[in-house]
Image: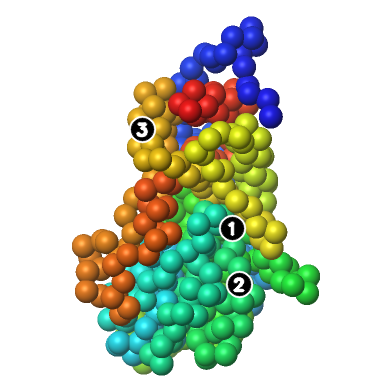
Amino acid sequence: MATPTAKDGSAQLPPVTNIQMVDLKAQYAAMQDEVDKAIIDVVRSGAFINGPAVKQFQAGLEDFLGAKHVIPCANGTDALQIALMALGLEPGDEVIVPAFTYVASAEIIALLRLSPVMVDVDPRTFNVRAEDIEAAITPKTKAIIPVHMFGQSCDMEPIIALAKTHGLHIVEDNAQSIGAIYTFSDGRKVRTGALGDIGCTSFYPSKNLGAYGDGGAINTNTTALADQIRKVANHGQNRRYYHEVVGCNSRLDSIQAAVLNCKLPRLEGYCDRRRMAADYYDANLQGIDGLLTPARQENSTHVFHQYTLRVDGGRRDALQEHLKAAGVPSMIYYPVPLYDQEAFKGTAANDIDFLPVTDLLCKEVISLPMHSEFDEATLAYIVETVRRFF
Ligand SMILES: *Cc1c(COP(=O)(O)O)cnc(C)c1O
């Protein structure tokens, strides 16, 4: 593996300044005319809510995911909440969720007075595994929320089998992995989000498919569920002013849909470019003692929402300081296990206060800049800065 060196052969590259975790400005610059026009068109049309741009995006996303029904909504957290509301769960019902994830995956369980049951994850893929889920199933278990972490699908085939055996709903948290493709053992390929009963995603600006504000979507292949989801997201009504259930108000606005319509056809390209950056990191960060590059599964493509390293020996925070001093941003996703969060004390049905892999990952993970707009000089500088630490 070549260690990048400066053109003159010296070991240290000249610093690249203004490196971003996510470069939204460069991505915008590459499609400025198209996005500007799409936004202005919405403003001129006055159709700010549920306008044609929203319908177009819904159809486009159905096509992309291979999902029968897409229901756009206000953000990814709402998507998860609405999904659970639509399943008609009762207070006290247990929902299995990984302890190593963004808070939203578990927050909505507790918010709805359901009981989160936290389980450990795989140390190499960061994803929940069927065996850990199976061990947590009780007679009260009603649903599983597999979170496709950092851009890769959970190993869904055994999880789907478990859900069938125990009569459980699967609500996928696909906020980080839209675009990834899972391959079943018979060769069948399905996009993440379209593997379970309901898929939920987020269009937060820094996600792989990001809007210019908040946005989210729910998808399902079950028509009855889609009707219920639509109803819940719209104040519990199908017919205006006739409210059948207590719902909420969660919509994707037309301006965000217009932006997403420009970006959706580019999503595959964005994922390819993220993968190219990950390939570069992988090739140039091998063979460093104490540093693990992210594992790639055989049964899932990786869309690299994050490029997440593990650093052993208690040196993670020192690496972050070293990177910062050299102008290289990095993030810790996530520093605290969910069971250690103040908000979840006493809410977890399984009384978990320690899971070994989650605990270890929270101490070892660090994510490098990752987006679709790198030039090689920037990647070379980041890699060289990491290598200099070890
Ligand atoms: C971003 C994210 C969410 C929530 O999305 P918002 O649109 O910010 O509400 C949920 N789950 C995971 C795993 C996420 O990364």
The residue under the point 74% across, 72% down is: 185
Q: Residue at x 48, y 17 (%)?
A: 15
Q: Can residue 229 be seen in this view?
A: no
Discs 2/3, front: 3
Spatial separation of the CA atoms under disc 2 and disc 3: 36 Å
Residue indicated by mark 1: 152
Residue 190 in the image, given as x and y percentages of width and height: 69, 69
Residue position for label 2: 156
Say which amino acid is labelled 1: Gln
Tag 1 secondary structure: loop
Residue 220: % across, % down? 57, 78
| Location of residue 163 (image quadrant) | bottom right
Q: Which residue is drawn at 53% across and 50% down?
A: 305
Label whose residue precedes the other's in the sequence (1 or 3) = 1
Distance, label 1 to label 3, CA atoms, is 28 Å
Is residue 326 shown above or below 197? Answer: above
Q: Is 83 drawn above or below residue 10 in the view shown?
A: below
Image mark for residue 245: none
**Label 3 Cα crowd, 10 Å radius (few <14 / some 14-19 / many 20+):** few
Residue 318 image label: 3
- Inspect this view and state whether residue 2 appears: yes
> What residue type is disc 3 on?
Ala
Q: Quadrant of residue 57?
A: bottom right
SS for dot 2: helix
- Quarter holding the N terminus is top right
Residue 383 lies, with reference to residue 74, above or below; the image says above
Between the C-alphas of marks 1 and 2, the distance is 11 Å
Identified at 22% across, 74% down, the residue is 346
